[in-house]
Amino acid sequence: MESGRTVAVFGAYGHTGRFVVAELLERGFVPVLSGRDADRLRALAASHGGLGVRPASVDDPASLDRALAGAAAVVNCAGPFAVTGAPVVEAALRTGIPYVDVAAEIEANADTFARFADRARAAGTAIVPAMAFYGGLGDLLATTAMGGWTAADEVHVAYGLSSWHPTAGTLAAGRVSRERRGGRHVRHTGGRLEYHDEPLPVLEWSFPAPMGPRPVIGGFTMADVVTVPSHLAVPEVRTYMAVDAARDLSAPDASAPAAVDERGRSAQIFLVDVLVRSGGAERRAVATGRDIYAVSAPLAVEAVHRILTGRTRTTGVASAGEMFDAPDFLRALSAHLALDVRR
């Protein structure tokens, strides 16, 4: 097994984890499958013709060390990340390898920055949280839209989803986040996170074609409120979710995504519209694609590839837009995303 191409995937048998494993294989990496359930790991390994299996649990540090031994990097796909994030980051730091995760949980991502920034920087280890559809993609788009600007007044990230069939992991992570904030809403304003109880407004957002204008929930806050201001001088970061998608997420009979193609992707279409304002000027970056869970895999794997080939801009804990050349990163995903930047 070539250690330089070996990547441990914790939570490999989860919905997003399976996409990450497939993407790693497609790009010539050797995934090592890890997680709590040994039977599910072995079944996944068999479906790919036999891959390395290393069961591990976040409450057993020695098992995590064994899972990461000899790997060049680790991708954490196991939520809720409030539970798994810190133990797997700790194991990556002990092992001396880069860490990437697909966390969408606001508090878990904030914890990673707060808890590990100094240690990761001192160790010279790259830690990239939220390297996924939520948090990572919005940050890459905002950074690209900024261009040469060193600061802006506002960043707005609007999510247009044709539907949202949440995974069990998404629902579990949402419950953990709501419990941590006592059911309150969160926003990034005045340069910091604030919690509040006011009802969220329904607004209209003029998405570009093919989506067009549609109602969105203002203050439907996603991980962008952690990733974007972690490195961009923007005091106001606001995110919005299409009303229909938000209703799907909260429906009592919400169903998981159903595969409709050979890659296992669902029929879901997304459009992420990022608007940056500075004074009277506006800049925009838009990405369209298919299946928010499937697209998280090329985002995470491209990050691993760039870290392992030395194409990074910093070390320690950093979001996608700070760690990588954002426009170049997005161009590398042209098979998965259509991009439009307007300055």
Image (spheres, rainbow, N blue to C red):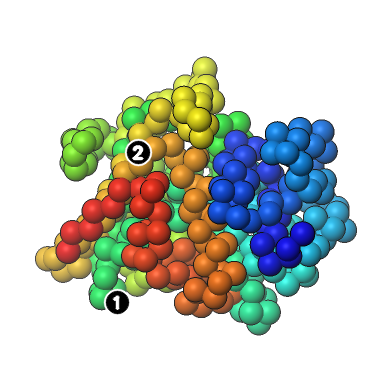
Residue 164: quadrant of the picture: top left
Which of the two residues, 116 or 321, is positioned nearer the viewer here? 321
| Other-residue count near label 1 (Cα within 10 Å), few / some / many at <14 / 14–19 / ≥20 | few
Residue at the left extreme of this rendering = 280
- Relative to 124, say whether 17 is above or below: above
Residue at image position (76%, 41%) is 50
Is residue 5 something that shows in the picture? yes
Residue at image position (25%, 74%) is 149
Residue at image position (50%, 59%) is 302
Instruction: Count all numbered tags in the image, as a single digit.
Output: 2
Tell me the distance, in whole angstroms, between the alpha carbons under discs 1 and 2: 29 Å
SS type, badge 1 = loop
Q: Is residue 188 left or right of residue 26?
A: left
Q: Position of residue 142 (x, y in %)?
A: 32, 61
Q: Is residue 64 left or right of residue 100?
A: right
Residue 301: quadrant of the picture: bottom right
Is residue 224 something that shows in the picture? no
**Residue type indicated by callout 2:** Phe
Which of the two residues, 213 or 54, is positioned nearer the viewer here? 54
**Residue type indicated by callout 1:** Thr
Residue at the bottom extreme of this rendering = 122
Q: Which residue is mark 1?
A: 150
- Quarter of the image with the N terminus in it: bottom right
Q: Which residue is mark 2?
A: 270
- Quarter of the image with the C terminus in it: bottom left
